[in-house]
Image: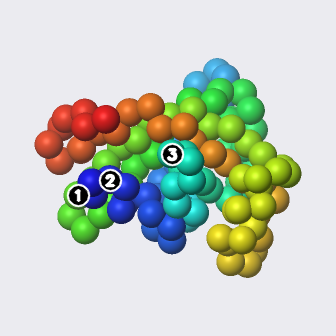
Amino acid sequence: MSWKKAISQGQEIILATSSKIGNPRAIVVISLGLFNKKLLIGACQMKRSLKNIKENTRVSIVAKYKNEYYRINGRAKIYSSGKFFEIALKRSEPPLPHHAITINIIEVFDLDKIKRIL
């Protein structure tokens, strides 16, 4: 499954969020990999994206592996302590995250084949 490789630890991915009134925000983040079937991301300097996630937990990710592109939709949750936060600290390089974000993956689309694959 190449989509899992596209979001493996160390991969650059695009995280898109939206405010409660629909203002979009897309940023480049580094994946900290999958943990318990959830994508883990460390939040270092993403103030607006964190605010958006607090208002609207729906997120979308665009990821690339070799010449294959994927869109992953899910629900995000923010942690400032606990298991996921500790894992994010261990898997991150400076600057260290102030929060950890987990994304419960709901759908995966192969953008080249224009087809839902999960």
Q: Dot 2 lies on which element?
A: helix
Q: Residue at x 37, y 60 (%)?
A: 6
Q: Residue at x 75, y 38 (%)?
A: 51
- Residue sitting at the far bottom: 94
| Residue neighbourhood size for the residue with mark 2, other residues' Cα within 10 Å, grouped as few (<14), some (14–19), many (≥20) | many
One can see residue 34 in this view: yes
Label 3, label 2: how far apart the Cα atoms are? 13 Å
Q: Quadrant of the C terminus?
A: top left
Report whether 10 appears left or right of 41.
left
* Cα distance between the residues tagged 3 and 1: 21 Å
**Which SS class for mark 3?**
loop
Relative to residue 60, is residue 63 depicted above or below? below
Q: Which numbered circle lies on residue 68? A: 1
Q: Are marks 2 and 1 in contact (CB under 8 Å)?
A: yes
- Circle 1 residues within 10 Å: few <14, some 14–19, many ≥20: some
Question: Residue at image x 64%, y 21%?
Answer: 21
Q: Amino acid at mark 2?
A: Trp
Q: Which of the image's four quarters has the N terminus?
A: bottom left
Q: Give how far across and how far down residue 61 sits, in percent.
A: 45, 46
Where 105 falls versus 1 (above or below)? Answer: above
Q: Amino acid at mark 1?
A: Glu
Nearest the camera: 59 or 25? 59
Q: Earlier in the sequence, mark 3 or mark 2?
A: 2
- Closer to the observer: label 3 or label 2? 3
- Do the residues under discs 3 and 1 have CB atoms within 8 angstroms? no
Q: Residue furthest top?
A: 21
Relative to residue 68, is residue 49 depicted above or below?
above
* Numbered mark located on residue 3 in the image: 2
* Amino acid type, mark 3: Lys
Please give the residue where the numbered disc 3 appears in the rendered image.
Answer: 37
